[in-house]
C-alpha cells in the first residue's frame, strides 16, 4: 500500500475507536483526540521505516534516509521484522514508557511521527526535496510544540498487568502500526505477522500497490471514513459539552 493509504487507515482506526475508550477508563479532551489521530496516522507509516528508498525516507532528508537504512539493516529488509506483531507490541509499549518516564524521548518520537504523517499524506512539492525538508520540519516542530503540554500517559486502559495502564500515546502508535500491517496483508506480498517465523500471511484483495483498486476504491473509502468519523466525533463532543452546561 502507498503511504497516504496507510496514513488514512491509521486516522480512520483512531477516530473509530475513540468513542469506546472512555468505557475503559481513557478519557480524552477534543485536542487529545485530534492529536491522537495525527499520531496514529504517522505511526501507520512506521513499519515502512525498513524501506530506505520509500517516500517517508525523504521526510527529513539525510536524517530519515540514514534512519531507514539502519532500520532496514537491523530488521532484515523490507517487510520483515517491522511488519509483525512483535513490532506492534514493541512500539506500543516502548512509546508508552517514553511518554510516562522520558518525555524528551517521546517528544522526539512525536516530531518524527508528525513528519512521517505529513509526508505520507502527500504534503510535499515534487522535485524540491530541500524545500520539503524545511517545510516538513517546520510544520512538525510547530505541531509538536502545540502538543507538548498534553497528558499522554493516562488515565489509561487497565491491561491487568500489575496495575499497568496504557496511555493514549502508546495506544495510538500501536494501533497505527497494526493498521499498516493489516493493510499490507491485503496485498499479494503479505507480511510475516508472526516474525521471526518467515511465513507470510495475505488476503490479496488489493492486487497491486498503487493500482486501480487502491486508487479508486480503498483510498476514497478511507477518505470518506475520516470525514464521517471526524464529524461524528466532533458532534459527539459538542453534544456532551452542551449537555454538561445546560442541565436543568
Image (spheres, rainbow, N blue to C red):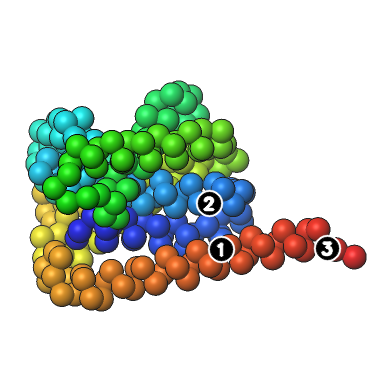
**Image quarter of residue 86:** top left
Task: Name the N-terminal-most of marks 2 and 3.
Answer: 2
Question: Pointer 2 and pointer 1: residues touching (CB < 8 Å)?
Answer: yes
For label 2, the crowd category at 10 Å Cα-Cα, with few meaning under 14, some 14 to 19 and many 20 or more, is many
* Quarter of the figure with the C terminus: bottom right
- Helix, strand or loop at disc 2? helix
Between residues 143 and 80, which one lies in front from this camera angle?
143
* Quarter of the figure with the N terminus: bottom left
Image height check: is 136 above or below 191? Answer: above
Task: Say whether residue 100 is visible.
Answer: yes
Q: Residue at x 56, y 42 (%)?
A: 156
Pinpoint residue 46: horizontal percent, then vertical percent. 27, 44
Image height check: is 94 above or below 239? Answer: above
Between the C-alphas of marks 2 and 3, the distance is 24 Å
According to the picture, the residue beneath numbered tag 1 turns out to be 233
Which numbered disc covers residue 54?
none
The furthest residue to the right? 248
Task: Name the N-terminal-most of marks 3 and 1.
Answer: 1
Task: Name the N-terminal-most of marks 2 and 1.
Answer: 2
According to the picture, the residue beneath numbered tag 2 turns out to be 33
Between residues 170 and 34, which one lies in front from this camera angle?
34
Between the C-alphas of marks 3 and 1, the distance is 20 Å
- Judged left or right of residue 182, residue 141 is right
Q: Residue at x 30, y 55 (%)?
A: 121
Q: Residue at x 47, y 26 (%)?
A: 103
For label 1, the crowd category at 10 Å Cα-Cα, with few meaning under 14, some 14 to 19 and many 20 or more, is some
Pinpoint residue 93: horizontal percent, then vertical percent. 40, 37
Which numbered disc covers residue 246?
3
Task: Say whether residue 81 is visible.
Answer: no
Image height check: is 167 above or below 203? Answer: above
Amino acid at each position: 500500500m502507498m503511504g497516504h493509504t496507510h496514513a488514512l487507515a491509521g486516522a480512520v482506526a483512531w477516530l473509530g475507536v475513540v468513542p469506546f475508550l472512555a468505557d475503559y477508563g481513557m478519557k480524552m479532551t477534543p485536542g487529545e483526540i485530534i492529536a491522537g489521530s495525527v499520531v496514529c496516522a504517522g505511526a501507520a507509516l512506521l513499519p515502512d521505516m525498513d524501506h530506505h528508498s520509500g517516500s517517508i525516507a525523504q521526510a527529513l532528508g539525510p536524517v530519515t534516509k540514514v534512519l531507514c537504512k539502519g532500520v532496514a539493516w537491523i530488521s532484515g529488509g523490507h517487510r520483515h521484522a517491522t511488519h509483525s506483531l512483535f513490532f506492534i507490541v514493541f512500539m506500543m509499549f516502548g512509546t508508552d514508557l517514553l511518554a510516562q518516564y522520558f518525555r524528551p524521548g517521546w517528544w522526539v518520537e512525536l516530531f518524527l511521527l508528525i513528519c512521517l504523517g505529513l509526508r505520507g499524506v502527500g504534503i510535499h512539492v515534487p522535485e524540491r526535496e530541500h524545500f520539503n525538508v524545511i517545510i516538513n520540519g517546520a510544520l512538525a516542530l510547530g505541531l509538536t510544540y502545540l502538543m507538548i503540554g498534553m497528558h499522554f500517559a493516562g488515565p489509561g486502559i487497565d491491561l491487568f498487568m500489575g496495575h499497568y495502564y496504557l496511555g493514549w500515546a502508546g495506544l495510538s502508535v500501536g494501533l497505527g502500526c497494526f493498521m499498516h500491517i493489516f493493510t499490507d496483508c491485503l496485498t499479494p506480498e503479505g507480511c510475516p505477522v508472526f516474525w521471526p517465523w518467515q511465513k507470510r500471511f495475505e488476503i490479496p484483495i488489493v492486487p497491486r500497490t498503487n493500482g486501480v483498486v487502491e486508487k479508486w476504491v480503498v483510498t476514497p473509502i478511507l477518505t470518506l471514513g475520516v470525514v464521517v468519523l471526524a464529524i461524528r466525533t466532533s458532534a459527539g463532543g459538542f453534544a456532551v459539552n452542551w449537555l454538561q452546561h445546560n442541565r436543568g
